[in-house]
Amino acid sequence: MDRFQGNGGLLQALTGRQFSKKLLAGALSGAGLLGVTWCLTRPVAEASRLPQRPTMQTTAGQAPRDPSVRYDDIKRMLEDSNPAVRLEAIKYIEVLTRPAGELIPLLSGHFNDPDPVVRIQCVYSAIRLGMPAEKGVAVAEQLLVPSNPRVCCLAAQVLGLAGAASEDALPQLRTCLTAKSIWVPLHAARAAVRIDPHESGAIGVLRRATESESGDVREFAQRALEEAVGKLAVDLDADEPETRQAAAMALEQFRSAASPAMPALMSCLTDGDLLVRAHAARAAFRAGAPATQIVPVVMDLLIPERMEVLRQATLILVEMGPEGREALPRLHECLAASATSVRLHAAEAALRIDPNDSATLKVLLTALNDRNVDVRYFAANSLAPAVLQNYEVACALRRAMGDASTQVAVAAALQYSRTQDLTHENLPQSEIVEVISFECSPEDVESWMADLESEKAEQRRMAAIRLALGGVEANPALPALIERLDDTNPAVRLAVAQAIWEIDHDAELVLSVFIELLSSKAPEIRIGAEYSLGRMGAAANRAVPELTKLLRASRSFEKLLVASSLVRIDAENSFALRLLLASVQSSETDIRYLSTVALGAMPLSHQLTAEESLNTLIQDGNSRIRHAAYESLSQLLVRRVVAIELESDR
């Protein structure tokens, strides 16, 4: 149960309520998972309403209904104009005692039958009689039509039996994974993993079925996963390191379903290829291996001279969080490395282990002010998880929303939004807000109020940011903030309006200010206004026309933030929603990365849709994107569980 410590602390920090490990475990288990993982699609209750599992029309092993039917009669039945009669003939053919060499040509003569059911049944029966499955691929590929579940499922089964010979059918099988009929995606997924056990989309469909379905559906998915895991376990013993690495990476996606491969994974923890070792360690941890077994392996992979290996090792520790505490001294050694990239990756992992680690915070907060945009961008993304626990981090990330780089400013805004979105107990279910505030003394408030009068704009801005983080405890500063709404510096006006909203939540006081700032020529000012309007939710409905104009005119990074804000204001804004969902397919690495962050802050009403899109990135070629997608999916699950808890208390 130790793996719930991280999320348990998050829930308590956000809601002010004590969530015991037992309660959290029960909640996550009820959602279909334990640990940091996810589930989606149909609820378990739906299984009872599902159509029966498609049955094959063949009756091999059974005697024909009328033993007096002769071979010539069967041949005539096969030529009958009625498809039902032809199907009956196929049943008889399967149980005839004649040589397969005589019966298979009889069936193959109908591989072009006008009736699709007859056509695919002839192919399937011919395979059962001994015809090589690859000879039926061309016919089956043409019959992958999701609108006809009976035919589509049997066609998928034929393709799966043919294995690698059906590789060209994979694009069509992937299309079938999103079909409405539950058996079509399942059969398509099983066929896909039989063709290629690395097929991430198919693995996701099968895994989610085992987590959220029951009965025949769950059993079917479990067997398909076990079959794929068995193939990948064999590949872990291949001579080529590339094959072993690919198998370990695929098994990462199976989570607990990969447990049958645990012995093979554990043997790979001493593999001579360090990347094989790293991916095997992650797969084993996700499959249920205790952190105490994995951390020593990961520590040995923290090699500054091998950046790709170190990157994988730090991402594993990021995933472990506090469970990786044993690696903290080794990470501290890496913080002193000469290479900036080594220091940053080590700091990212160390911060997840201890969000108040002073050496780590120094590295990342310094990086947030670096001249290099890429360094600031990395720091903004890495600091976000510590926002709830560390006041200085929260201040720094709020300040980073005003970065001169659009990329950095948008990253800071999206990360801050995602840090935690919950259904607040005092607001309607449709309004999503984040709960980020810190205690402040009356003396603190007085000091910051005095700073609001400073001649230095940056000092006034930081005073407003600190008051915003004080939340309702900074209420005595409200009159002084309202007086500052007409500050001559737009960055100060923005920060002041944000503080007023955080303290008082009075939309009428600040909405016009945010709308006016949307027209600023300075990207960092627009970004702050866009973030704030999304933060206001439905209360900012009057800003939708201006935001929509910006969405059509803005580019790449800013477009993501505008779309995210529009969806938070109006969850049914289809234009913005489509753009967010499509962003996961971008050719730009950073857009795909930030899309995982934006989707992690989606309204609860679209959470399942967001999860489906995020699942497409689980096998992305970029390891950071894969991890970010996994993390957003994990956070969405936690948010859903807490929202259910809050709703049940009403």
Image (cartoon, helix red, strand yellow):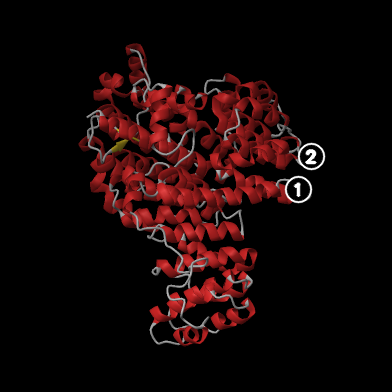
Residue 585 percent across, percent down from the top left:
50, 57
Q: Quadrant of residue 298?
A: top right
For this view, does 524 lie left or right of residue 644?
A: right
Residue 335 percent across, percent down from the top left:
67, 26
Residue 637 percent across, percent down from the top left:
41, 38
Mark with earlier residue (1, 2): 1
For this view, does 201 lie left or right of residue 230?
A: left
| Residue 241's disc number | 1
Quarter of the image with the C terminus in it: top left
Give the answer, above or below, for where 444 lies relative to 497.
Answer: above
Three-letter amino acid code of the residue under disc 1: Pro
Furthest residue in direction front, as rendered: 68
Q: Quadrant of residue 29?
A: top left
For residue 367, say whether it is visible. Answer: no
Mark 2: few, some, or many residues within 10 Å (few <14, many ≥20)?
A: few
Give the answer, above or below, for where 88 lies relative to 176.
Answer: below
Dot 2 corresponds to which residue? 272
Q: CA distance from mark 1 to mark 2?
A: 9 Å
Q: Please name the residue shown 64% across and 79% down the image.
A: 101
